[in-house]
């Protein structure tokens, strides 16, 4: 085979997505640290599955660039965690190389993977070698160097896969912690599985999903609450959750010119809980309305529908009350809307769509107590998620829209979520809302930044600068349990014991979580410290909470302000911040 057309490319991408799905639990197991949050495989799987859904119903005679761009857009909006965001950027670069081409030769294919590497590296401020970035760089460079014009597509993909595997095997030599623990990079492994599936398709075998793996996991919503279903009859009148994807048409097809501001104004006048995302000629819409027909008739003036979903929210309410999953869960799951605009009076007529305030704050949270703490500090929208289930780019885009503000500041509160938040800000560029990431990597940092959030007489850049400065004042740590036996940096880890972790450094691993907490705090508290904050998780009883509060006040109360909160977060028994 000498060329790749749209039909084959679709098979390659779907085969790659399915192969990754079949192996994502194995990727999760490659987690370096023995903590119960090894989610690289899940993040990559959810990201790539989002792209697969975008192309699975596209025609076999599709335009090559349109197909690749659709897959890339799906990855962009579904991206979760650092590995997911980097994967989305890899395929963004890959799709960019398809412009103007009806088919791909082996030389074109090599150039496409080089483009994938270049875009991925640009997306990361400080690239780390021994990761997924290394795998795409070394394998694409090798393919570019060794590919020959007379080589078949099958041979080229086999060569690319072979080089990717070699690069993956080499990652422990570039990242010492991998070598110490005896694993290869998990993100790189996920990419190899993806490439493996793509290569299989060139040989005529499209990998299918293995039913034994189970259905693709979806992000759990904290406390079984779903934002889209948290509506009162007075506020929304129930109505219909209406979602559609519109492909913008051309004048010669009888379609009116699409004006994004007018379109948003119409939606805001006739509906609630509005989310619109535009990417080139595609507009994705989520709206709650009493008149879905009017919405669809209006939208069809500008193009043709790709998909339409309408759900009766009266029935939705009954489903939620019975513990069933919300039907519009997939459009932006994990977002709690804390504040809703007042309903537009029926006789006021259309109004110009505009943000209702200047500034707003979005924070990622993972427990009822934490949600309450962030809300009390002025956070407008809570995005459910955290260490074990990272929110997607689309979750952040939806949260930004819910704020109805000109400037929105995002607190990811986890190092693995910062890239997805940053990508959401890029998606919103050019619109009426400007979003900024305050790169909080822990919950204590996020709480400190939220406390410093003040916009009285200040400009957005000053606010951002102040919030970023607050992050540097906080030292963070956590206590969680070990999921396997291993040795890291001279510390022996015993499965089931509790680990005191300061950043990524393991301070101790002991049988008693109270002892682990004591070890952690001793490592964090310095002479200059003034405030000690401890947030207890869902596995900590009220009696244990009282014991923590009493012992810490006895030991540190004379020199520090000691604050103990119930956060009810999963996985981590204690989150600790010292300022």
Image: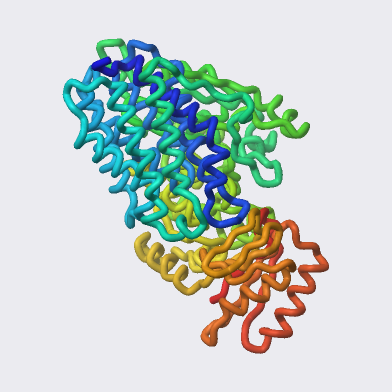
Q: Which is nearer the eye, 350 or 513?
A: 513
Snapshot colouring: rainbow
Q: Is residue 74 above or below residue 123?
A: above
- Is residue 361 at all visible to an observer of this figure? no
Q: Which is nearer the eye, 410 or 39?
A: 39
Q: Which residue is located at x 39 percent, y 26 percent?
A: 198
Q: Which is nearer the eye, 179 or 515?
A: 179
Number of numbered discs overlaid on the protein picture: 0
Q: Position of residue 115 (x, y in %)?
A: 25, 37
Q: Position of residue 73 (x, y in %)?
A: 38, 31
- Is residue 149 at all visible to an observer of this figure? yes
Q: Quadrant of the N terminus?
A: top left
The residue furthest right is 543
The residue furthest left is 149
Q: Quadrant of the C terminus?
A: bottom right
Position of 168 with respect to 545 (left or right) is left
Q: Which is nearer the eye, 339 or 398?
A: 398
Q: Which residue is located at x 36 percent, y 19 percent?
A: 202
Q: Is residue 183 above or below residue 25?
A: below
- Residue 226: quarter of image: top right
Q: Which residue is located at x 35 percent, y 35 percent?
A: 162
- Residue 83: quarter of image: top left
Position of 379 with respect to 302 (left or right) is right
Q: Position of residue 304 (x, y in %)?
A: 39, 15
- Residue 525: quarter of image: bottom right
Q: Position of residue 576 (x, y in %)?
A: 61, 69
Position of 120 with respect to 183 (left or right) is left
Q: Which residue is located at x 52 percent, y 42 percent?
A: 27
């Amino acid at each position: 085979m000498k060329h790749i057309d749209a039909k084959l490319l679709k098979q390659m991408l779907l085969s790659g997505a399915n192969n990754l799905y079949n192996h994502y639990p194995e990727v999760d197991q490659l987690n370096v640290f023995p903590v119960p949050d090894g989610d690289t495989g899940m993040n990559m799987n959810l990201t790539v599955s989002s792209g697969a859904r975008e192309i699975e119903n596209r025609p076999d005679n599709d335009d090559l660039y349109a197909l690749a761009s659709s897959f890339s857009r799906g990855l962009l909006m579904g991206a979760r965690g650092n590995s997911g965001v980097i994967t989305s950027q890899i395929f963004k670069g890959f799709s960019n190389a398809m412009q103007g081409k009806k088919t791909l030769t082996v030389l074109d294919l090599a150039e496409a993977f080089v483009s994938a590497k270049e875009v991925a590296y640009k997306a990361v401020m400080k690239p780390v070698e021994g990761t997924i970035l290394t795998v795409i760089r070394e394998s694409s460079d090798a393919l570019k160097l060794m590919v020959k014009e007379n080589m078949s597509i099958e041979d080229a993909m086999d060569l690319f896969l072979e080089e990717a595997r070699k690069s993956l095997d080499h990652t422990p030599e570039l990242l010492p912690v991998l070598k110490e623990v005896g694993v290869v990079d998990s993100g790189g492994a996920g990419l190899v599985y993806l490439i493996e599936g793509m290569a299989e398709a060139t040989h005529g075998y499209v990998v299918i999903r293995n039913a034994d793996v189970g259905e693709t996991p979806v992000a759990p919503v904290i406390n079984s609450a779903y934002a889209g279903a948290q509506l009162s009859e007075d506020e929304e009148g129930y109505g219909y959750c209406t979602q559609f994807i519109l492909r913008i048409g051309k004048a010669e097809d009888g379609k009116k010119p699409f004006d994004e501001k007018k379109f948003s104004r119409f939606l805001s006048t006739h509906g609630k809980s509005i989310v619109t995302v535009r990417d080139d000629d595609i507009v994705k819409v989520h709206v709650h309305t009493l008149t879905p027909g009017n919405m669809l008739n209006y939208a069809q003036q500008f193009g043709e529908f790709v998909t339409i979903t309408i759900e009766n929210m009266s029935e939705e309410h009954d489903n939620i009350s019975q513990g069933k999953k919300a039907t519009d869960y997939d459009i932006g799951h994990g977002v709690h809307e804390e504040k809703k605009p007042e309903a537009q009076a029926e006789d006021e007529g259309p109004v110009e769509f505009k943000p209702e305030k200047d500034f707003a704050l979005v924070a990622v949270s993972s427990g009822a107590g934490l949600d309450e703490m962030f809300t009390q500090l002025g956070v407008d929208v809570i995005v459910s998620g955290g260490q074990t289930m990272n929110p997607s780019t689309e979750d952040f885009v939806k949260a930004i829209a819910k704020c109805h503000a000109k400037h929105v500041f995002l607190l990811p509160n986890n190092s693995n979520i910062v890239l997805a938040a940053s990508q959401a800000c890029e998606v919103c560029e050019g619109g009426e809302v400007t979003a900024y990431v305050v790169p909080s990597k822990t919950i204590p940092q996020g709480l400190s930044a939220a406390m410093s959030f003040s916009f009285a007489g200040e400009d957005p850049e000053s606010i951002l600068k102040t919030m970023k400065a607050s992050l540097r004042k906080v030292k963070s740590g956590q206590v969680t349990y070990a999921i396997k036996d291993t040795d890291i940096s001279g510390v022996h880890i015993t499965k089931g014991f509790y680990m005191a972790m300061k950043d990524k450094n393991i301070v101790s691993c002991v049988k008693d979580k109270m002892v682990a907490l004591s070890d952690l705090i001793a490592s964090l508290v310095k002479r200059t410290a003034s405030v000690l904050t401890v947030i207890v998780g869902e596995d900590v009883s009220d009696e244990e909470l009282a014991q923590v509060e009493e012992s810490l006040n006895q030991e540190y109360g004379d020199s520090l302000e000691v604050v103990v909160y119930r956060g009810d977060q999963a996985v981590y028994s204690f989150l600790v911040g010292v300022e």
